[in-house]
Amino acid sequence: MDRTGQVLATWVDLWTAAGIAETRKAAPRVETHRTPVRCGGARPRGALSGMIEFRHVSKIYGKVRALDDVTFAVGPGSVTGFLGPNGAGKSTALRVLVGLSRPSSGSATVLGLPYAEMACPGLRAGTLLDAGARHPGRTGREVLTLGAMTLGLPRTRVGEVLDLVGLTERESRRRIGGYSLGMRQRLGIAHALLGDPEVLILDEPANGLDPQGIHWMRLLLRHLADSGCAVLLSSHLLHEVEQVADRIVMIGRGRVLAQGTVEELSRGRGLEQTFLELTAHTDRSPGTGTFPGVDAGRGAA
Ligand SMILES: Nc1ncnc2c1ncn2[C@@H]1O[C@H](COP(=O)(O)OP(=O)(O)OP(=O)(O)O)[C@@H](O)[C@H]1O
């Protein structure tokens, strides 16, 4: 993008931020999850009780039933791993949850409301759906500053979240187009954490992170959950999920195949074995080829 295009894009962002900030003036006062919160609204009646709730959610694209009667909840102070093979419906579920896609039936709510109806979603629910979707011509700091402005937060918050995710001051002033995948993920997580949210919705946050980065991510998510946050974590990294998650929801062909604690689903043999068994008969299951001399139970994750 040329210089004029970049200036124009920055003005559009500032204008959007100003508009949202204006809207927020009329919104109820909001405090973080460490203090009582007045944002949100009445909870729908029913058996589930979570900070994130899917109730009989189906999503149909033409002839594809991407989600089929999905029901589960994520409670406070926990990490829930959301697992499924390619095409199982994980991204669709998260898109429905954050209002980017409308369910064909059923409802998905965050803190008792559809995300799109929350008065101040960015302050209460941090999301990372596609770390690669950011404007390559902006610096990480610019993106975070715009995010902070949009949420009505002081600029000092930008430095705090940069520290939290381990991006240096120098890195934050580089254009995102020159970031590694791991740096983009860290920036995406920093953006999700700006509002000190009580709910975190993360789609493949460990993609592109090196072993130290994955270790750091595990500690961060554990810390957030231990301080009361509800974390929904979609991932293909079974071993990582196994180490950080309290609960697991497995889906295949859009349906919930199993849900429970890591111990319940591991059945003493590890999550991977359960995952392979449960997803073996779904159309979009991983390859089931066998390899001479390789024990299927010891295959790669
Ligand atoms: N916009 C769309 N139009 C048509 N079909 C779609 C659309 N989005 C998703 N699908 C289909 O819905 C199904 C679920 O896709 P989804 O991306 O949610 O799976 P996923 O579990 O996130 O997969 P992956 O792990 O590969 O990212 C797939 O069959 C996909 O082709």
Image: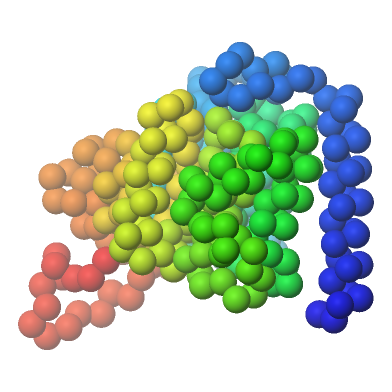
Q: Quadrant of residue 157?
A: top right
**Is the residue 30 above or below the residue 161 in the image?**
above
| Residue appearing at x 20%, y 80% in the figure | 290
Can I make out residue 251 in this image? no
Q: Which residue is farthest front?
A: 170
Can I make out residue 239 in this image? yes
| Visual colour scheme | rainbow
The answer to whether 71 appears left or right of 30 in the picture is left
Location of the C terminus by quadrant is bottom left
Q: Which residue is farthest bottom?
A: 292
Q: Position of residue 107 (x, y in %)?
A: 65, 36
| Residue appearing at x 85%, y 62% in the figure | 10
Q: Position of residue 15 (x, y in %)?
A: 91, 51
Q: Position of residue 74 (x, y in %)?
A: 47, 33
Q: Position of residue 116 (x, y in %)?
A: 75, 38
Q: Quadrant of residue 276?
A: bottom left
**Is the residue 30 above or below the residue 151 in the image?**
above
Instruction: Give 10 or 205, whichever is nearer the viewer.
Output: 10
The answer to whether 232 appears left or right of 278 in the picture is right
The answer to whether 1 appears left or right of 220 in the picture is right
Instruction: Give 6 or 101, whichever is nearer the viewer.
Output: 6
Q: Quadrant of residue 236?
A: bottom left
| Residue appearing at x 64%, y 64% in the figure | 173
**Is the residue 268 above or below the residue 38 in the image?**
below
Instruction: Give 194 or 114, whichever is nearer the viewer.
Output: 194
| Residue appearing at x 88%, y 68% in the figure | 7
Query: Ligand 1 appears in which quadrant?
Result: bottom right
**Is the residue 298 above or below the residue 60 in the image?**
below
Location of the N terminus by quadrant is bottom right
Instruction: Give 133 or 268, whichever is nearer the viewer.
Output: 133
